[in-house]
Image: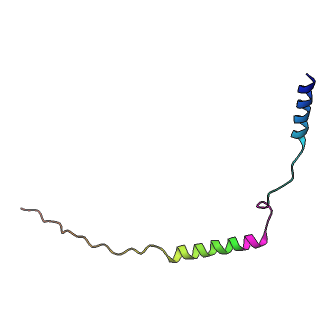
Amino acid sequence: MKRSCIMLLTLVALGTVTVRAAPPTVTPSPGYDARLQEQRAAAAASSRSAGPVHKPVTPRHHKRGRAH
């Protein structure tokens, strides 16, 4: 009984503690943001200029006229 009460109190104490640590990817980095914007701009520019070129398609077969 004592052991279960201690475990319960420990879990409650751990649950009320707020964690404020953040991984480095969460904190803002001006250098990373600038590089990311440059990459996005370059990707957008290349996707606009490298669009697929559509050639006009000529029909291969001629339609037959109806026999009267």
- Compared to residue 54, the image places residue 66 above or below, namely above
- Compared to residue 61, the image places residue 9 above or below, namely above
What colouring style does the render use? Answer: rainbow
Q: Quadrant of residue 58?
A: bottom left
As rendered, which of 15 and 49 lies closer to the eye? 15
**Picture coordinates of residue 52, whole percent (x, y):** 44, 73
Q: Quadrant of residue 13?
A: top right
- Residue 25: say if magenta: yes
Q: Which residue is situated farthest in the top direction here?
A: 1
Q: Quadrant of residue 33?
A: bottom right
Q: Residue at x 79, y 57 (%)?
A: 23
Question: Magenta span covers which residues?
Answer: 24-34
Q: Which residue is situated farthest in the front direction here?
A: 3
As rendered, which of 66 and 63 lies closer to the eye? 63
Q: Residue at x 35, y 75 (%)?
A: 55
Q: Taking 67 as reference, is 6 left or right?
A: right
Q: Which residue is situated farthest in the left direction here?
A: 68
Q: Residue at x 25, y 70 (%)?
A: 59
**Picture coordinates of residue 61, whole percent (x, y):** 20, 68
- Residue 48: say if magenta: no
